[in-house]
Amino acid sequence: LSKSAENQFEFVQFMDSKSSSFEIVDSCPRPSEPLCLQTKFTDALFHSIQKAYSKFTSCQHIRLVVLTDGYMDLVNPNEVEIKVPEMIKEEITCIVINHSGSQVPFRLNPLKYNFTDYHVHDNKSLASCNEVANTVMKFSSCEISSTAILSIGHLSASVSLFPSPCIRPWKHLNIRRNQESRFYVEAFGFLQVNDMGHPPIVSRYTMVHSPDTDRSGGDLLKVLLESLKGSHTAAITNIYIQSLVDGGSVTTKDRQFVTHGFISESHGNGLCLSFFGEESIAVAWLGPFDFLASSGDFEGHEVYNTEKKITPFPVGSLERPSYILPAASSTIGAEFQYSSWLNNSNGPSVDVNKIFRLCKKLPEKADYFLKELNRVMSLAEVLGWAELTQAIQTLLPTHISQDLDMEMLRKVYHAARMKVV
């Protein structure tokens, strides 16, 4: 912990450069100076945890290690009223290593009450860094089995992911902590690599065959790799976590969706599984397509051809095409114009200003206004832009005329994802 410019304590960020790390260490306060440990240790600690947590992804895990010599603490634990947000409680393993073997200081009691995965290790013999590291790993039970089931249609294979993803089974599944769980990766379609623009990847894992549990699955991975290389495509996947039943098989009972992802060719002639964030919706990152149609239209037709620029993607129906918006003068089945904020830095501000301009023309421009409002709110939700949706919801009532009838107001509030008062 080091003191920031705001007079708060936070975690030190070490760099790959040795010289930079030396400078960071030199800038830390001297042990003789009055540090946060003497007054508001838990306040500073929780502030640092929340700040560091925002930089971690769904497949990473923070291990909070507190080393103490068991000093006498006169702080009344009842005076400490600190609560960690619920989303962090189950994401962090808190390990208190007590070198003296005596009672853990009262000042550390808030850690016990705020972290679900809390451990205390009393051992006077901990002297070396290796022993401390071994103790930390002993109490770090977040990782599920690195073995996963890959399913493509009626084919399946047992695979291993390296490094092992770090997801807590008890967070996603209602299972006992001592019950083994694993990933289930379901490939449901293929997409040309050139049609993927800035996918929201949070982590990547090398995927290899696991011959110990499945000797025939290696052929499936070989075919998949050659197919992805030859067609320049990626396999779009749903990623689940589920409990492991007897015999090494899997069951759909207790299976829970974790996130989207895709399998692609990696450097070195291998397969790579990429995870999206748990809150990501796989829509905004998809690029423009030359052809969109319902699944039935692909039967018996050529579905992929680089020379002819055929890059298809099945959608639900022609009446509701995905990922694109019709041009102003077009009809269903005619040319479509792709709309994306990812390639236009002024796109969000232009769209939001348009909404507020149209507000002044209600109810005459009601259909156009509701369509644009719903589009902007949908894009903001897909991108995880909560601040934008909240700003629109706050400002919208101030721009709407008070003379609108209740039915029109209800439609506006519904499109803005707001509750009708």
Image (spheres, rainbow, N blue to C red):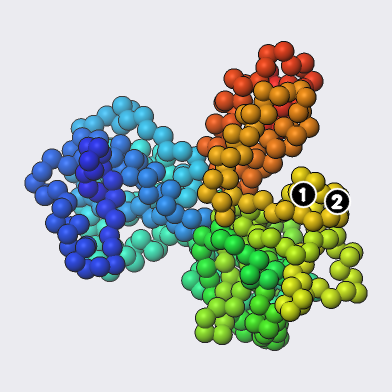
Q: Secondary structure at mark 1?
A: strand
Q: Earlier in the sequence, mark 1 or mark 2?
A: 1
Q: Position of residue 204 (x, y in %)?
A: 52, 68
Which residue is nearer to you in this view: 262 or 257? 262
Q: Is residue 53 left or right of residue 202?
A: left
Instruction: Please name the residue shown 23% across and 55% down the image.
Output: 99
Q: Position of residue 154 (x, y in %)?
A: 80, 74
Instruction: Please name the residue shown 23% across and 31% down the image.
Output: 75
The amino acid beneath tag 2 is Ile
Q: Secondary structure at mark 2?
A: loop
Quarter of the figure with the C terminus: top right
Name the mark on residue 189. none
The crowding category of the residue bearing disc 1, from other C-alpha atoms within 10 Å (few below 14, some 14 to 19, many at least 20), is some
Check disc 1 and report the residue beneath it. Answer: 326
Q: Is residue 13 left or right of residue 142?
A: left
Residue 355 visible in the displayed image: yes
Contact between labelled residues 2 and 1, with CB atoms less than 8 Å apart: yes
| Depicted 18 relative to depicted 101: above or below | below
Check disc 2 and report the residue beneath it. Answer: 332
